[in-house]
Image (cartoon, helix red, strand yellow):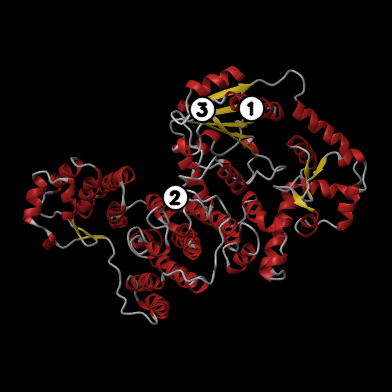
Amino acid sequence: MLTQLDDWLVGGPPCGMVVSANPAARTALLARWALSIVERKSAEVIFVPVSPCLGTAVERDVLKLLFGLFRSSETAVFSRPRSPEELMLSIRMALRGVDSVSSVPDEECPQLLVIVDGIERAADGWPHRRMPFLGEAYDGAHILVSTSPEDSSARGLGLHERLAWSREKTSVFLIASESESPEGTAQAQRTVERAGDVAPSSVRFFDALGTVLAPVSNDDLVSALGLDTTEVEAFKDGPHAAQRLVLLSDDGKFSFRDDATRAGWTMETNKVASIEDALIVRGLAALTRGAISPEAWPSYLVEYLGAHMKRRSVSIFDLLTLVSPEWLRIWMSHPGGLVGFTTDARRARYAAEDALIEACRPERAAAAAQERATLLCVVVRCALVEASLFAKEGGIEEVDYRTAPYVEPTVDVTKPTGAMRERAEALVTFASLLTGSEQQLVRGWATDACAGLDEIVPRPIPYVATDPSSADPERTRRIRAGATYDEVDGYLSRDMVIRPTDLSPDEAWRLAESREGESRMVSFAGILPDLPEDMREKAVREVMSAYWAHGDRLALRVLSACAPWMALPDAAMVMCNELGNDWTGDLPGMLVGFGSLTELSPLLLRLGGAAAIVGVARAIAEVGQWLP
């Protein structure tokens, strides 16, 4: 097997997967091979074990460890990542520019080997296709993950799909099981046998250790897991055989001695789900009542409540309680608060996005308009909160990212976001899209936001013009003559896609089909109102395909103008992908301008009607009051 791995590293595809039912033997083999690579100076090696016993089973912990293990951050996208997404983007950039993180074997031919061992122990749903941070290895980079065999009866995406790895470009190494009982299974069996020696008063202690996602302190076992101090003391005073199952670290945290021991105990007791449910109830109740001061919250509960909620698939609105002023104050009182809070906010956003896509399915579309509007508001609220905190942190402008080492970012929540005018413009724009009592409601929020500012006018909204007078014979002549890419903007008048009404439908269709990139998008967008239903659906698909292939800021404006004719799943996909992307990540840009909420408002109307506009306006106003 070592020879096969060597051959893969020299001439194989960039991605590899080691599959074995014997985790202990698998880890030993990979560790031995990684050490040999280092000794031979064949590549820079980064070895990341995935294990709740080590505190590396939750995505946030793995990302921070992986980012911190790179040799330098000289070309990192972010030297102070503020969220799991920024950690992922920096890791992906390092895998694209190997020379920035490796000089092995030499500067002329740097090589990087990343090993992620035991990915089946990932605790909170990663890896996932939404952000495949291990999915793009460029020249000089190789990625190897190890896992147990997948259960053929399990539902959901397989590991290849979750990693966004094509099977054709992935080498798979199968380690056959030994004829005798593998070490891990034998250890698990011994653990179960030893359970008979554990006093009943210590059983809950072991159950708690089998549930936690990282090593846990004595105080956290009591305050977060609900153990009585006598139950912890019973373990300490218990038989030596039972104590040998547990490690106590130098900083006073307990964990099972290894993953096989942990698996053996939890396999026998099967109490993990009920303990997690109780932990979640305990945490949410304390948060709702405000009974504990931010500084006094148990560290484990702060860091892992969101992960346990994700594992137990709690409701979106339970997750949304972690996107609140109270939870932010708690996180800001603990180390790593900004990354921790944004991780919880992303969990709520992703859950809402998944539910939104589901609510757009054809069989549910007619009855789910209000549900879609509600889910859109959750997505927008989470995005606004994250962007507001980033605006207040501002550390990315203050640090030389080429040389600065990684430090945990902090945020001053009293610092202004600098988006007062943009917030007012967004609210005024949304009010202009409504009528009646809904307009009056949003106008009230807009009036409050405009206080002390110069005149605010609504932003233009992308749309396809229907006025035949917009036809331009000279433009038509140029189009027929084969207008160049640089002349595409002739189709655009501010935020209006002009219909070529002086072209026949067949001529306009042939013209659109002959175009490429954004010219193709604009051509198909312009003829949408004149097409029969079956051709219109095809034209929208053409616009969507051109956008995903060639899209930029101008293209997104054109796409937004097509929203009235867009399929609901497509509209939801665009909204979820573009809100807070590269050009709308800052708060002012998220509110107004290219790819902003105002520019995407036709998509909001398509997905949730006036209710979505009102709900998003409410989110803008409320987040503005919370994080001005």
Is there CB contact under 8 Å for labels 1 and 3?
no
Disc 3 residue crowd, few under 14, some 14–19, many 20+, Cα 10 Å: some
Q: Secondary structure at mark 2?
A: loop
Which of labels 1 and 2 is toward the front?
Answer: 1
**What residue did someone put label 2 on?**
363
Q: Quadrant of residue 344?
A: bottom right
Which label number is shown at residue 35?
1
Q: Is residue 196 visible?
A: no
* Callout 1: SS: helix
Q: Residues within 10 Å of mark 2 (few under 14, many from 20)?
A: few
Instruction: Please indicate whether residue 512 sits to the left or right of residue 614 in the image.
Output: left
For the residue pair 225 and 367, the one nearer the viewer reads as 225
Mark 3 is on which residue type?
Pro
Please name the amino acid that badge 1 sits on.
Answer: Leu
Measured in 3D between alpha carbons, the distance from the residue under mark 1 to the one under mark 2, in whole angstroms, is 55 Å
Amino acid under disc 2: Glu
